[in-house]
Amino acid sequence: MGDMNNRFMLAQSFEQAGEFQKAMEILEELIKRQPDNYQFFDALNRMYINLKKYDKSAVLIEQRLNKNPHDLNLWGMLGSTYHVMGNEPKAFEIWDEALIKLPRNQINYKVIANFALQRRAFEKAIEYLLAGKKLSGDPKMFSYDLGNIYSLTMRYKDAAEEYSGIISSDPNQLRMVESRIMAYINKPGALEPTLKVFQSRVDKNNISSVYMLARLYIDAKDYEKAFELYLDIDAKQQNQGTELFNFAQIAFSEKQFKAASQAFNKIIELYPKSPLASNAKLGYAKTLEASLDEEYKTRVPSWKTFYPPVKISSGKVDLVIDAYNNIIGLYPHSEQAYEAYWRLGRMKHFMQNDLPGAEKYFNIIISESPLSIFYPDALLDLAGVELIKGNVDAAEKYYFKVVETKRSPVEKRNKANYALAKIFFARGNFIKAKELLVGVISNLKDNQANDAIELSLLMNTQMNDSSKLVLFGEAELLAEGNRFEGALDKYKIIAEDDKSLMLAALAKLRIAEMEIALDEYRGALLSLADIAKEENENIYADKALYLSAKVYEFGTKDLVKAIEMYEKLLAKFPSSLYLDEARESIIKLRKTT
Amino acid sequence: MLKKIVFVFFIFLITATAQDKILIYMDLEQTDHLKAYGITFHALTEGLIADWLLNYRGGSFLIDYSNKIAAECRIENVSFDIVNTSQSAEIYSICQSEDNNMDVVRLEKAPKIAVYVPPGFAPWDDAVTLALEYAKVPYDKLWNDEILRGDLSEYDWLHLHHEDFTGQYGKFYASFSSAQWYIDQQMMYEQNAKKNGYKKVSSMMLDVALIIKNYIAQGGFLFAMCSAADSYDIALAAHSTDICAQMYDGDAADPDAQTKLDFFNSLAFTDFDLEMNPFVYEYSNIDIQPQEIGSAQNDYFTLFEFSAKYDPVPTMLTQNHANVVHGFMGQTTMFRKNLVKPSVIILAERQGTDQVKYIHGSFGRGTFTFYGGHDPEDYQHAVGDPPTELNLYKSSPGYRLILNNILFPAAKKKKQKT
């Protein structure tokens, strides 16, 4: 026996080394000595298959089968040998025969189906699994396999029918079925037939089937239908809005604000005492605001350097205001309430141009909660309001508070420092202005750094003409405060002075920008053409061409002229900063014209 | 009289403009080397005359002036100069002077390009399609169905990427056999083989390889990268044996497969040893192993310099603004020099080693070019890695070699100098 073991181990070593012929010779010798040894038999059969000696394999298995006619595994192996030798009909005949001759048993179908699967005879495997399923008292045992093969072979409708059947017979299988379906649902052609099957087979009394359909609606981006189903699920589950809340969060993350707000609102309406109610309220308000913000962005002429406040009179504004006020009323002095105040203040400022209204909200945060994370934001926004009102001293005070507040994040301090520098610049205190800019410039990653460098450069080069610099600073403050006409007059005075080249060039550009802000496109185009004509004499010549193109594109809507201007920019200023944007615009406009 | 003078002056202006040319220089001053190929390609589709100035300022292009092409250059950020008649005559004379290793190759017509890719393929899976998309060069996608029904004859140039022509699914079995993408891929190939009347994927792939070989023989241009290069040649050599293990084609490989290889039938490689272990991620010893390459920092390959006037084809294929190019890995990274057939021209190699990166050869009336590695700007691209953003590699010398191949079929055949 010891010798046989050693010989067997030697055969195994030959097999591992790929020396199948040598392994076979040893195994043939061993099987002669011990014909009933399964290990020898199995290994020898493997060698025959490896060496493509299929006839020998068949004889070997048949000999063993004669002795053990009830061994299903041997039937399976024999079929496989015929299959690998290319005799598919014979293989199927043997597998069929096994299922007829052996006692009718669902497991036998599964075993033979596995042999067919190993041979990648998918259709035959499906046939065996379907037969086994019919025989079985537990069809899901077969349905999972069937669903898997169907989805692999891209028969998505059949797969959905199997999975839907599992949920119908055993709703507890939902998570397993969901994970199986989600694994392939994004493949081309999978979603539509799957959705159709679940639509036609949905059972309102089977919550799992409803849930699965709702999940598929989300994948199909049909949030309306998904919402209706989640409502139903939530009512039946008595989960105090948990399912609806999950749905609302998915919809919010997918920017489906309408569906998200509906769902949040429904939680508030149906489950006011749910632990999720406060989060649902905040979610509801933010969803409404996000939706409003999308609408607002489409109305703002962001292509302009300066533009007057854009009021939005949509009924949605009141809805958002009510939602935030609701939070303030229910959860006073909480961080959520201060966030609500701050958001309300910004809405009043930017969307409604209601400066006193905005001030009121920002002041609540400043007076009540200096420790709130919204405190520096409220100060910055309040300073902005004061600048628009022309109260430069008040704005200065708030900006200084931002800088002095230790809890203010660096980027907010930089923002305040830059704003302060501009105020001191307008007052003619250039030393103080430059001092304030140093900190901003030292942090080049900051958004304000570029503007700060530009302002610093302007002061350094134009220090000898301080009266014009001060005038320019005043004009800048006016422009920022949306008083474009006043600013325009001052810029015109500066532009007339040919001595201060850089300042005059910038003032000329600003004139055009003010004209654009005032919708005086004809005048703006003339001003810009004058600058562009100066080419290398004016450092803003390329920007002038770029702005001309923008005016044609968005102002006068002359797209052909816009393309012409962008192309001119590319031809005349091959090193301009605006080239990439110009190229993108040309490509975009060419598609539309 | 005044009208007449104005008219004559106007005519003079137009004539002068029409005789100007656009010089797209391809040396280090070029801002976007890759898009320059796209511009030249478009000029050819517009029916303009374009010359490829071999070895002149990095392999520049001289194109008849047209406002449209000039505007395209500006939009695509491709640097160029407008040269007048006397300047272009001077450039031609420099290129054609016997003192300079330069020449002028006239590009006749934009080649019709096909890329061999499976359905559902995304452009970022493949460096060539990335380059074509970036340079805005149009191409069609072909797969087995189209090749088997004879569509290849409609194309001048065919690209193969990392498809496995041996039918072993890239030999990813050991690492990825349970990964969904692997399962789906195997299923897709099997269904495709069944649809086309084949019992085995490997049999179908062999027929596809043979049709491609015939396409080259008839005058087609084949460009293969990464594992398509060696797997293609191995499939051709293994036409009369079975090299696929059971997990790949359902039956065992022929134990004598190695001795049955027919190297007469392969295009580029000879006398290679197959890697018969199905669990080893390698087809043969053609490919250079990572441990032979060493560190990425030292992985550079050098382009050979050819005589532009006597060997215009290899010269075209090696036009570049850099002669030493950073290497990059792939399922097949480089080829072992002693296994390359003597008739094949080595275009680039790692100096001082037996590792070659870029080879070119002829078969029948056509040619083939093999380029090792997956993505010239992603040293070790792994399955699932994000695509390379070519905007960041506008002057990639490695990508330029790919694009040389798409313009080379456009070249007008000259009589060989003797």
Image (cartoon, rainbow, N blue to C red):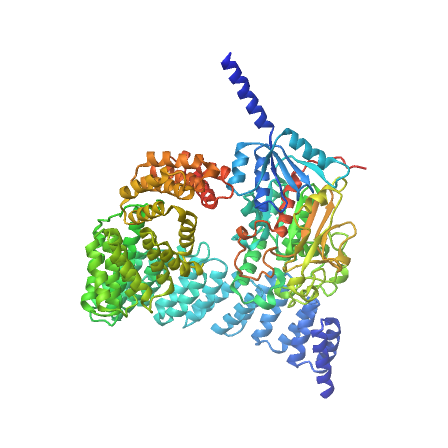
- The spot of residue A279 in percent (x, y) is 27, 67
Q: Choose between A469 and A96: the one closer to the eye.
A: A469
**Quarter of the view holding residue B333:** bottom right
- The spot of residue B384 in percent (x, y) is 53, 61
**Quarter of the view holding residue A336:** bottom left
Q: Residue at left 61%, top 60%?
A: B379
Q: Quadrant of the C terminus of chain A?
A: top left
Task: Using the image, determine if residue B230 lies above or below residue B413.
Answer: below
Task: Using the image, determine if residue A232 lies above or below residue A39.
Answer: above
Q: Residue at left 52%, top 42%?
A: B76
Q: Choose between A192 and A348: the one closer to the eye.
A: A348
Q: Is residue A279 left or right of residue A74?
A: left
- The spot of residue A66 in percent (x, y) is 63, 75
Q: Is residue A158 left or right of residue B130?
A: left
Residue furthest to the bottom? A2
Residue furthest to the front? A464
- The spot of residue B8 in percent (x, y) is 55, 17
Task: Using the image, determine if residue B220 lies above or below residue A371.
Answer: above
**Quarter of the view holding residue B256:** bottom right
Residue furthest to the left? A329
Q: Quadrant of the N terminus of chain A?
A: bottom right
Q: Is residue A353 left or right of residue B162?
A: left
On the question of residue A593 being in view, the answer is no
